[in-house]
Amino acid sequence: QLHRHPYPTPSGVLSMELTIEDIFLYAGLAWAARRWVVPHPWMFYIVTVQIGVGLYTWFKLGVCVVGGGSPKGRKGKYPKHVRTLQRRLSVYDQLKPVSSFNPFVNDSWKIDEFDRIRISINAATILPIRILGTFISLLLGAIFAVLAVRGLPPNPKFKSMKDLYDYMKERGEILEEQGKDGTVDLKKKAFEYIIERVNSKKHKAEDIMKLGEKEFLNLASKNLRHICWYRPLESWRRQLLIPVRFCARALLFFSGFLWIKTEGELGSAEEAPILISNHVCMIDPAFMVYAALPAPIAAAEHLKMPLLGSIVSAIQCVTFDRFSPSSRKEVRNELIARAAPGAGWPQILIYPEATCTNGEAIITFKTGAFNPGRPVQMVCVRYRGRFNPAWVGAGPGLWHIVFRLMCEPMNFMKVDYGPIYDPNPEEKKDALLYARRVRDKMAYFFDLKATGHSFDDVKLQALATKTNSPAEKAVIEAEAIRKHFSMKLDSIKKYYEAFLKLDKDKDGLLSRSDFLFGMGAGTPEESPQWSNVFDLLDNDGDGYIDFRVYLIGMAFANTDLNNEKVLKQVHQIFDLDGDGFLNLQEFTDILHKACPSDELYTPASIVEIFQDVDENNDGKIAVEEFIKYAESNPKLKKSFALWRKNFDVSGILEDPTTEKKA
């Protein structure tokens, strides 16, 4: 039941029924209407407004009805084809998806007409109350957060260069080094310190160096605000933050989480200084603030949010700036310092997946949480009920999630506190090994799928959304492909941009004609070799290839291979009938393609060579016979290597319509 989400049944109709909480809600509304509306005629004005809100909501929810598209307006209907068995490149056996499951898809926004009416009624009745309750909870939380840090030094406001030097020393910068002349250029160091920490897109280094002292100090004060208090709060100040925990629980209550079930015990900061958890949506950190008041890793932008910024600052979040070149290093050093034994800091909350998933899988972990080499406690958050609030690329947006949560009479959430993982000496030295073993342990302990997806897939989804392509089709398990082919994300993005140019109908799939057009190959009859390349990529034989298959094929064609693998690939491509052997015509095509200007390969000589290569005289050449012949012929061997180089498909990154010659 923990994994129960309202996905479509095979018939395409969602099964939604009235629950006990719906019955209690509507019974309460009926009693309230009889108690207050009927005796007071002026209440009919409020009811009229509520009816208007309900009708507006009903109209806007039309796009979410099954078969009506998606909350983002896309009506992605993808072709379905009968699948047939086809040959496949050996690379597919090495790069089979760890799971066909996509952790970045959330279809729970789909509803039927009954739920459309039900949600419209709830939007007109309980939604306003919950919005008001959420605002009051945030307001009270911000007030207590401000009181808890009242009297502490404000965020850095430098009045002189000395103030900045003192700040740098407190942050661990060494300013006592002397130059050859016995002095140290502190001002130059200060400028370099700020240049590393500002938004490089807004402030160029050469422009900063030209600033006067006053303008420079103002820039430093503004851009160092994202660094929260760098000493632990006194215990009495931490006690003042306890009301913030209850405000977080009130916020969850007004989001529909009336009861939250927990299992296991949460360790102390001494036992587990770092908490790691899967990440589904913005509800996760709200609960953890209520449960333990930890210091999460957060983007610097959160400090600028009304009300929420005060809470983020008071609980001493470790903040990072996405556009600062040194932010990653600063956060790493901060984590190591805070997780040190006896440091006195609260627990640190980290989501090592670095993005949200739909809660049914664990994707590749980043190593940030494991660099300190300290024990971590595993936490798993699960949601069930009518609506899954997963904030993923192929799913509802943030405000749609908030709206749906507040329009449900009751939402269900379960939090499991797993075991504390204490790393051994080998894992302390290797953060990547530590992260991999903890991930495997979490997947086993919490019974979750472990996939090869990563944050890179989220970036590709964002690129797909910008071009109105299906976001779910951009998920390719990028981490596994990157490792196998040693590819960088920028290269994958370039391939994806080329793929999108070929995908004319924006359905996330390439047909044979799309592929041949991109290769400048004309029709299948004009370029049978390129058509055969498509058949090799189309490993499931449905006549279409998605981006993952396309990327593997392109990377495979541009990867350095030993000569035996090259010859196997040549044999496969020219084996046009797909029987695993070369007949005389196919063998002739190979020789003419490899050595087009060689006059020795006349029809009569080719027949003679074919008979010599065909050792068992069965009228066809197996791949082993072909490799043996090619290996014994240095000229032909060199030609095949050159042919494969000319077969390079990287040119499509520049212009998909450029004519290519195989």
Image (spheres, helix red, strand yellow):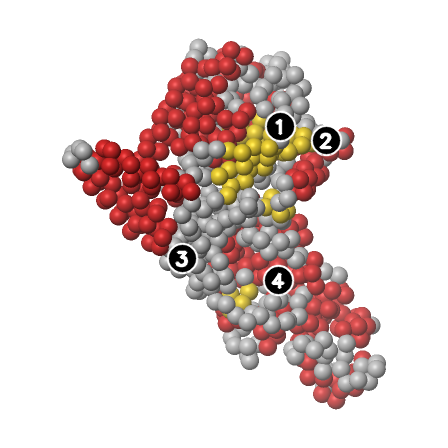
Kind of element beneath mark 4: helix
Measured Cα–Cα span from mark 1 to mark 3: 41 Å
Viewer-side residue, 513 vs 274: 274
Upstream in the sequence, badge 1 or badge 2?
1
Image quadrant where one finds the N terminus: top right
The residue tagged 2 is 423
Q: Position of residue 652 (x, y in %)?
A: 54, 62
The residue tagged 4 is 553
Measured Cα–Cα span from mark 4 to mark 2: 39 Å
Q: Amino acid at mark 1?
A: Glu
Q: Position of residue 205 (x, y in %)?
A: 48, 31
Measured Cα–Cα span from mark 4 to mark 3: 35 Å
Q: Amino acid at mark 4?
A: Gly
Proximity of marks 4 and 3: CB atoms separated by less than 8 Å: no
Q: Amino acid at mark 2?
A: Pro
Identify the residue at horizontal 37%, vertical 24% (top origin): 139
Kind of element beneath mark 2: loop
Q: Which mark is residue 66?
A: 3
The residue tagged 1 is 265
Which of pointers 3 and 2 indicates the residue nearer the eye?
3
Proximity of marks 1 and 2: CB atoms separated by less than 8 Å: no
Upstream in the sequence, badge 4 or badge 3?
3
Crowding near pointer 2: few (<14 within 10 Å), some, many (20+)?
A: some
Image quadrant where one finds the C terminus: bottom right
Measured Cα–Cα span from mark 3 to mark 2: 48 Å
Upstream in the sequence, badge 3 or badge 2?
3
Furthest residue in direction bottom, as rendered: 604
Q: Position of residue 509 (x, y in %)?
A: 50, 63
User: Would you identify the image quadrant in which residue 159 lies?
Assistant: top left
Q: Amino acid at mark 3?
A: Val
